[in-house]
Image: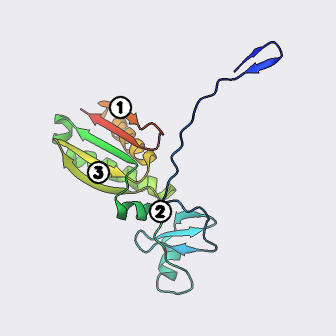
Amino acid sequence: MSRKGRKWITETQEFQSTDDPYLPKKAPGGEAICPRCHAVFRDKRWLLDEDFYQEFKDSDLVPKYLCPGCRKAVDRYPMGYLYLSGDFFNEHKEEIMRVINNEYERARQKNPLQQIIATYEEDGSTVIETTTENLAQRLGRAVYRAYKGDLSFRWSEGNKLVRVYWKR
């Protein structure tokens, strides 16, 4: 933004947003639990509270809904991909997958909607599909911090789908 005389000249940039079709438009009232991942909806957000889940899992007092993360996982709707490849990865695959699982557990403690949908082999690399773009980035950065290598990010036009490539 710059100023020319008495008028402000602004640069407009077209922003393309991709709304997440799995997030509800209106939050359900009260509390709910997800029977698939044991997440609890309380105070207008999803969180992990295993004690609450165990107390009310068999009760009719608290409704049971699939959380948006589980709905994405069931429908196979990934918003992030992590590609792991290279000779070093093939030699240390078990250790690297342990780092990924540890980082995934830390991420789920903060936001249970971040989930790993699937892990599979494709064209000589391991692919991890995630329900959010942030989780794919977080897992890629964790592997990079632990083992270095080459890390690159490729976003879609609306910045809601990311492909993270790590190779060493």
Q: Nearer the viewer, residue 16 or 143?
A: 16
Question: What is the quadrant of the C terminus in the image?
Answer: top left
The CA distance from mark 1 to mark 2 is 28 Å
| Crowd class of label 3 (few under 14; some 14 to 19; many from 20; radius 10 Å) | few
The CA distance from mark 3 to mark 2 is 26 Å
| Numbered tag placed on residue 152 in the rendering | 1
Q: Amino acid at mark 2?
A: Pro
* Above or below, comparing residue 142 to residue 110 in the picture: above
Residue 153 in percent (x, y) is at 38, 34
User: Would residue 41 be found to the left or right of residue 98 on screen?
Assistant: right
Q: Nearer the viewer, mark 3 or mark 2?
A: 2
Q: Amino acid at mark 1?
A: Ser
Are circles 1 and 2 on residues that touch, CB within 8 Å?
no
Are circles 1 and 3 on residues that touch, CB within 8 Å?
no
Q: Nearer the viewer, residue 84 or 75?
A: 75
| Crowd class of label 1 (few under 14; some 14 to 19; many from 20; radius 10 Å) | few
Q: Which structural element holds mark 2?
A: helix
Residue 100 in percent (x, y) is at 33, 48
| Numbered tag placed on residue 98 in the rendering | 3
Q: Which structural element holds mark 1?
A: strand
Residue 101 in percent (x, y) is at 33, 53
| Numbered tag placed on residue 68 in the rendering | 2
Q: Quadrant of residue 3?
A: top right
Number of on-image labels: 3
